[in-house]
Amino acid sequence: MGETTEHRSGFHRQNIGTADVARLVAALDQQDAAAGVRRLRAWTHEVLAAGDGERALDVGCGTGSQTLRLADAVGPAGDALGVEPNPGLRAVAEERAAAAGSRARFTDGDALALPLPGASVDVVWCERVLQHVTEPDRAVAEMARVLRPGGRIALLDTDWATTILHPGEPAVMAAFTAAALASAANPHAGRELVGRLTRAGLVIDDRGAQALLQDHRSVPWPLVRMLGESAVRRGLLSREECDRAYAGLEEAAGRGALHMSVTMFAVVAHRPG
Ligand SMILES: C[S@@+](CC[C@H](N)C(=O)[O-])C[C@H]1O[C@@H](n2cnc3c(N)ncnc32)[C@H](O)[C@@H]1O
């Protein structure tokens, strides 16, 4: 496995074809169920307010959960299109839409070159995609291009520097956070949303945030171990320090004292016109 792959998650476009789709679907389903994600999505949909008859676009839609929600919001007179480059995820989105009787549609495409004419959509949703994109400013410029004047956009993304794992030696826990930072193309995507939208000529309307909290019942141990192993490979932790950290976290989980969180941000903006 090369250095580039080590730095990029299974959601990065370059890893389509090698990433295990079932694992990606399981991760997205787990996030769909997380209370923090649900709260931030609810707030963002309320502010974005996709309405009857509008044309909605979900960029990097994954399994399409939010494309289906947008399809419900725009109704039969509207249109909700999910753009997703990973054929395995797109197939799951199509199956789920059919099973739900949704009118949501899906197509192949890249955030860097959206397969849509300019000024052709009323609302854009793009959640946790920019952290995986190599040229995020170009992606936001593309979303601004396809928005009609007056159209609205919601960007939601994680900021991996806000990762907290507790209890543990602060320096050891910082190594886990450093490993989280190294796994995304843009680990600070959350804090960069406002600047990117503004650079694309869009006007900020509102901003929200939610910490995604895990407790001793929901802690994603495979993720914790992936971060620990990555920290060891990078020479940030010795084997012994890492194993001691796992043992400390497991012991804390056993007595209901484990805290794990990361903060996700949402920004809603519009194209002036
Ligand atoms: C963490 S998932 C989020 C999926 C979905 N938006 C959600 O919130 O459930 C990231 C998604 O971005 C997609 N993606 C990665 N690079 C992309 C690109 N260049 N253009 C469009 N989508 C991309 C991935 O295939 C994946 O579906």
Image: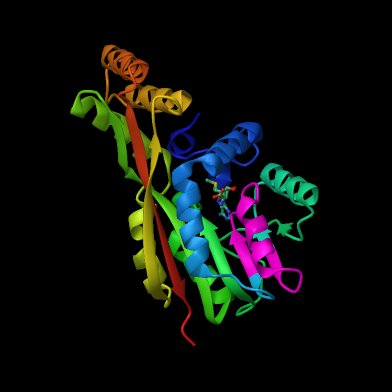
Image coordinates for residue 123, horizontal then vertical, percent: 57, 71
Image coordinates for residue 139, horizontal then vertical, percent: 50, 63
Left or right relative to 81: residue 170: left
The residue sitting at 26% across, 28% down in the picture is: 173
Q: Residue 57 lies in magenta, yes or no?
A: yes
* Residue 43 shows in this picture: yes
Left or right relative to 235: residue 118: right
Q: Front-most of 81 and 5?
A: 81
Image coordinates for residue 11, horizontal then vertical, percent: 55, 43
Q: Residue furthest front?
A: 256
* Residue 109 shows in this picture: no
The residue sitting at 62% across, 75% down in the picture is: 121
Magenta range is 56-80
Left or right relative to 96: residue 209: left
Residue 229, compared with residue 13, is above or below; it is above
Q: Residue 123 lies in magenta, yes or no?
A: no
| Occupied quadrant, residue 202 | bottom left
The residue sitting at 44% across, 23% down in the picture is: 221
